[in-house]
């Protein structure tokens, strides 16, 4: 289980959180198939540092972005 | 060509305590300079692809490059369940193509993969489960696939350790049973395909990691860079499971995949007690008993992507709580080992098989939490696709461009996630 550093509540156990997937995926403004495919489905899924959204659902309820290394599962500071 | 296994050859082997068996497949130290097809990934699916390329489609100059050892990834980490009772016609056809091959695989490969069609029992715990399963059963029967509804009493008769107590958290309200489903020996599947492919001239190169994909001025692939030198090939088949996104990124492609840890565990071995495979979609638990006597238990995925091949304890705890309640006999059993594998999950929980926007680059991925059961079928349709350069009839609906056209095969909602 991860120990997640919530910027508002401090380190809390993972079961209080919901993972909301990759951060920085921007909703397209134009009606373009390629852009919408990328928005809806394509992900970087890196073996390395991953920027991801978390929500402290059973805590403060806020969304925030963290960077985690996907091999060590350790949270790191933003690159 | 390795010696054929027969009763006589086994008896001869027994005379010297099975110490004189030679290696069953060639494992060259380095790949040759060029091939017709290079398969990236030496798991069950990759080895099956290479075998069918050589055995059925006449492509002899094939290499399988594997960064670790063959069958060391998800092929050696799954819970070995085989079934084909999927909801949509496209999936049912693909998985049943595999199941029909499982039934004759030991003979075809001359290697005992210990396929045991002992029946797969899917437990219903609510009115909703029951409606979904009955719909599955009707859809399967229309597709010519066996699947039947059992009342709780019939389910108990088929699987005696099951409790029908009404006051448990997950009471059993019935079950769907596919009698043709069952289990197979996962390592034997990798070894059997490797042996049969090697005998037909396929080079299986282990400890050989792909580090780059070479392309010409027009963008078409010309080969791969590996930790053991460059290899030229006009066609590359990527069968890298959880690491597919990493390999495809070498060709500049973003994939509709996310890699999650999926866990399994085994108990201490006990006498034969569990006659079938039982799974519960609602609580993410599946259990069967191996021939060694261990209970093989599958849990769910973690919520975040990871390549760590280790999952969280709370996922195992949730599964074990459900197992202990459904099968009270097992409450005193001790667990021996738990492990994780990295599964590549697509948005619609269906695999991706076929070409990519990069000419010559093909991919077979996205099998998510349930790829083992498809191994021979997946290898066969992917080999056909690689050999002909166009998708096999059964693979066509599973193309990468379905995420642009919107023709998704949404088994996630239908099968309640568990594979």
Image: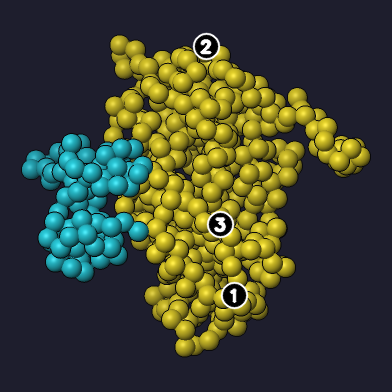
Q: Residue at x 91, y 40 (%)?
A: B15
Label 3 residue SS: strand
Location of residue A35 in the rendering, given as x and y in whole percent from the top left corner = 17, 38
Q: Is residue B283 visible?
A: yes
- Position of B355 with respect to B46 (left or right) is left
B239 or B227: nearer the viewer: B227
Label 2 residue SS: loop
Q: Going by the picture, which residue comes out furthest to the left?
A: A29
Q: Which residue is mark 1?
A: B332
Q: Colour of chain B?
A: yellow
Callout 2: few (<14), some (14-19), or many (20+) C-alpha neighbours within 10 Å? few
Q: Colour of chain A?
A: cyan
Location of residue B22 in the rendering, given as x and y in whole percent from the top left corner = 77, 29
Marks 2/1: CA–CA distance? 57 Å
Marks 2/3: CA–CA distance? 42 Å
Q: Which residue is mark 2?
A: B33
Q: Earlier in the sequence, mark 2 or mark 3?
A: 2
Q: Residue at x 73, y 45 (%)?
A: B112
Contact? badges 2 and 1 (CB < 8 Å): no
Q: Which residue is mark 3?
A: B337
Contact? badges 1 and 3 (CB < 8 Å): no
Q: Nearer the viewer, mark 2 or mark 3?
A: 3
- Position of B367 with respect to B356 (left or right) is right
Q: Residue at x 72, y 31 (%)?
A: B24
């Amino acid at each position: 289980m991860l120990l997640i550093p919530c910027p508002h509540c401090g380190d809390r156990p993972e079961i209080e959180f919901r993972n909301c997937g990759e951060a920085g995926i921007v909703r397209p403004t134009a009606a373009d198939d390629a852009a919408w495919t990328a928005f809806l489905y394509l992900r970087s899924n890196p073996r390395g540092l991953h920027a991801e959204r978390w929500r402290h659902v059973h805590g403060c309820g806020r969304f925030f972005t963290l960077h985690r290394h996907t091999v060590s599962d350790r949270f790191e500071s933003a690159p | 060509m390795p010696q054929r296994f027969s009763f006589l050859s086994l008896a001869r082997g027994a005379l010297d305590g099975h110490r004189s068996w030679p290696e069953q497949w060639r494992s060259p130290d380095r790949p040759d300079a060029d091939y017709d097809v290079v398969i990236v990934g030496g798991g069950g699916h990759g080895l099956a692809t290479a075998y069918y390329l050589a055995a059925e489609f006449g492509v002899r100059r094939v290499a399988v490059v594997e960064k670790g050892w063959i069958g060391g990834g998800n092929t050696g980490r799954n819970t070995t369940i085989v079934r084909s009772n999927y909801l949509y016609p496209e999936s049912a056809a693909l998985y049943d193509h595999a199941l029909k091959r499982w039934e004759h695989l030991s003979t075809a490969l001359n290697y005992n993969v210990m396929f045991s069609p002992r029946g797969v029992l899917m437990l219903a715990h609510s009115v909703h489960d029951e409606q979904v399963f009955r719909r599955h059963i009707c859809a399967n029967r229309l597709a010519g696939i066996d699947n039947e509804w059992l009342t709780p009493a019939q389910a108990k008769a088929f699987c005696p350790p099951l409790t029908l107590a009404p006051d448990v958290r997950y009471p059993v309200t019935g079950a769907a049973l596919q009698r043709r489903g069952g289990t197979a020996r996962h390592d034997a599947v990798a070894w059997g395909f490797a042996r049969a492919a090697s005998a037909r001239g396929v080079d299986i190169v282990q400890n050989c990691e792909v580090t780059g994909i070479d392309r010409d001025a027009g963008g078409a692939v010309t080969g791969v860079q590996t930790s053991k030198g460059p290899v030229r090939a006009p066609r590359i088949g990527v069968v890298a499971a959880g690491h597919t996104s990493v390999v495809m990124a070498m060709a500049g492609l973003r994939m509709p995949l996310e890699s999650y840890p999926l866990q399994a565990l085994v108990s201490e071995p006990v006498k034969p007690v569990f006659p079938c495979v039982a799974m519960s979609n609602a609580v993410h638990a599946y259990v069967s008993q191996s021939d060694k006597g261990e209970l093989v238990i599958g849990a769910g995925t973690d919520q975040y992507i990871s390549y760590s091949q280790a999952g969280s304890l709370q996922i195992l705890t949730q599964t074990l709580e459900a197992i202990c309640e459904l099968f009270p006999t097992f409450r005193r059993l001790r667990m021996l080992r738990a492990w994780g594998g990295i599964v590549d999950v697509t948005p619609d929980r269906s695999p991706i098989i076929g070409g990519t926007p990069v000419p010559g680059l093909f991919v077979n991925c996205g099998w998510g939490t349930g790829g083992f059961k498809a191994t021979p079928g997946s290898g066969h349709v992917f080999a056909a696709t690689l050999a002909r350069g166009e998708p096999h009839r059964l693979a066509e609906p599973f193309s990468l461009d379905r995420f642009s056209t919107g023709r998704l095969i949404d088994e996630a909602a239908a099968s309640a996630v568990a594979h």
